[in-house]
Amino acid sequence: MTWYSREDAAERAGVDSPFLARLVDLGILAPHETDRFSPGDVRRVMLANSLEQAGIPLEGVGAAMQRGGLSLDFLDAASYERFVALATESFRQVSDRTGIPFELLMVIREAIGMAQPSPDDRLREDEMAIVPFIELQVAEGFRPAAIERLLRVQGDSTRRITEQEAAWWNSEVIEPAIAAGKGAEEIANPELADRISPLAEQAVRTMYRAQQARAWTANIIEGFETLMEKAGIRSRLDRLPAICFLDITGFTRLTQERGDDAAADLATMVARLVQRSSVQHGGKPIKWLGDGVMFYFGDPSPGVRAALEMVDGLAAAGLPPAHVGLHAGPVLFQEGDYFGQTVNLSARIADYARQGEVLVTQAVVDASHDKGIAFADIGRVELKGVSGTVHLLRADLV
């Protein structure tokens, strides 16, 4: 167990010593000895400071704790060690020591979702753990814009996970405990939190590494494709397959707004519709990706018709409008997934398409033999993440 003096505990909590002494007098803090405070005590000081800044009288909190109606003992649980204290260095000091521009250091706090810091604000201990990652990138010459972009995406993605986790804990633990009339300690349920938190973190870490493996595989394969192209190595397939990406505008947001049961029904309806349309035309859904689905078609021509039917079918079912991108070309198959430049280009085309549009490349048109489909020329366009321009056409039923 780590112990802190009164001065050290106050400094780590970002308060002055008189404030900490006041908490002892109110019974909110009960130090092990006169001048020995635990990490849990530091967390109690930080929470008490937040409560007072929110206008909650600490005298009332202390009185409730003395009566047994309120407890902060749960902050001693191992699972609450993520409520970290302040580090000893300010943003300015870390910037001077590491050479990381202050503007880039600020992104750490902003990505976590906190207010923009000033140069003399101290970093938190968890923020300090991110600093070596940025320091290495800066030393290796990574562009600041690329470093910032990754930090913000990491922050936004983990925020979405933790917000859903908080809602899950509230609905499955806190609300049932309150409804059952349980006490403060049972409502906090630190014993369950200690058991489930490591498993939740393990699940997230495992999913992250699995996603890493897939993304790294995509990088390796696309780089290998580029090298093969430079070496003049081409696919020998007579008819190249097609990859189709169908995106449903705002589908994830819509399912979140409609509640669990309605969201499940909605997802089932969409899955049934796209599964039926794709399979009827010789394709197969590969995976769901946020608001959309990726499909593989051995023959591009029926893939176009399937895409048009899916867009019309979703609209007829009263669902949000979809937009589609298709490209025909060689793909590499590994562990149930497809990789390569064809996959990447198809996804970028889907991003470019407007609501209700099915956009295809000239390679898809060249392989099409369905007389009931017409292609309107859009011309050469620039796509995000794709070098040069790509010739696109819009598919329509005639």
Image (cartoon, grey):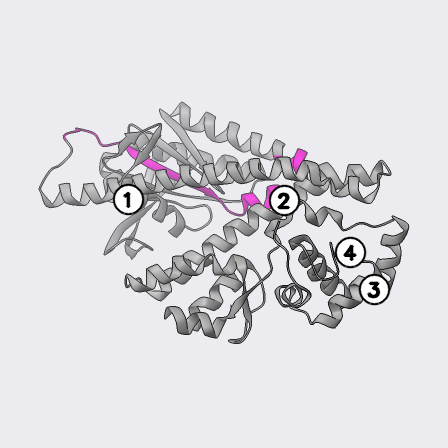
Q: CA distance from mark 2 to mark 3?
A: 26 Å
Labels 4 and 1: the sequence-earlier one: 4
- Asked which quadrant contains residue 77, the reply is top right
**Of pointers 1 and 3, the one earlier in the residue sequence:** 3
Marks 2 and 3: CB-CB under 8 Å? Answer: no
Q: Nearer the viewer, residue 278 or 133?
A: 133
| Residue 60 drawn in magenta | no
Residue at 72% from the left image edge and 63% from the top image edge: 50
Q: Which mark is residue 318?
A: none
Residue 195 drawn at (x, y percent): 63, 35
In what element is the residue under mark 4?
Answer: loop
Where's residue 205, x and y in %? Answer: 47, 40
**Mark 1, residue position:** 219
Q: CA distance from mark 4 to mark 1?
A: 55 Å
Tag nearer the camera, 2 or 4: 4
User: CB of mark 4 within 8 Å of CB of mark 3?
Assistant: no
**Residue hosting label 2:** 78
Residue pictured at 69% horizontal, 58% vertical? 36
Report the span colored magenta: 236-263
**Residue located beneath label 4 in the image:** 30
In terms of secondary structure, where does tag 1 sit?
Answer: helix
Which amino acid type corresponds to the residue marked 2 in the rendered image? Ala
- Is residue 398 at all visible to an observer of this figure? no
Left or right of 153 on screen, residue 260 = right
- Report which residue position mark 3 lands on: 25
